[in-house]
Image: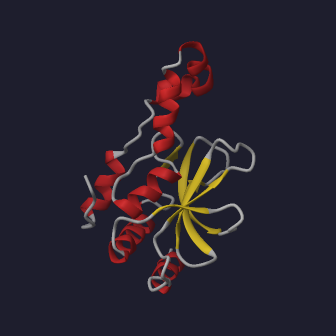
Amino acid sequence: MQNFHNLIDRNLSHPDYGRVLQHRDRNNPNILHYSIQLNERDSLAWEPIHSGKEKDTGKLAIWQIDWHHFRVDQTRSHDRDRINRSLHVSVDNFHKQWQYELYRFNCEHWARLVSTGDCRCYQIAEFKKLERIPVLGIFIVGIAGTVTGAWEHNGYAQEVIERAGVETCA
């Protein structure tokens, strides 16, 4: 874990530190993956330990940025010091200690929490819109989204960051 802390601090002065990045899944282009930019070539992401699982122990991972596929999702709303504190809290409290859950706490929830203080996944909102389309919506989203109670906003993860003394947009 010390390597994550060192990497986070070493890049604090990079001009693009803390930006939310996204890229499309190569196998399913309808799915976006999110990470936090640390420097020109590295980003930090939240993912399941066993790739491809909807629910698994989560871990932080260093992703190499491929600028042909990655793009900036939004401008960050927190200052770099707050993002830095949120990244450190993530290493201490989430890495291999929290569940990665596709519908409740995925890479987008985490990246937006770190960058903006709002633990939100807009992809879940889009899936829920599909549920409103009678038969097709249930088929596309599947029973999993309905059963899991897919959360656009995860207040529990947001509270972890807040308890550590990092202000969020609550």
Q: Position of residue 113 (x, y in %)?
A: 39, 57
In this view, the residue farthest toward the top is: 135
Q: Position of residue 160 (x, y in %)?
A: 31, 57
**Colour mode?**
secondary structure
Q: Position of residue 118 (x, y in %)?
A: 34, 53
Relative vertical location of residue 56 with respect to residue 114 in this rendering, above or below: above
Residue at left 28%, top 59%? 168
Q: In which image quadrant can residue 23 be found? A: bottom right
Total count of labels? 0
Residue at left 67%, top 45%? 52
Relative vertical location of residue 168 with respect to residue 55 in this rendering, above or below: below
Q: Quick one: 75 or 108, which is closer to the camera?
A: 75
Q: In which image quadrant can residue 81 be found? A: bottom left
Q: Is residue 168 left or right of residue 103?
A: left
Residue at left 52%, top 53%? 107
Q: Quick one: 143 or 138, which is closer to the camera?
A: 138
Q: Position of residue 101 (x, y in %)?
A: 51, 43
Relative vertical location of residue 4 with respect to residue 109 in this rendering, above or below: below
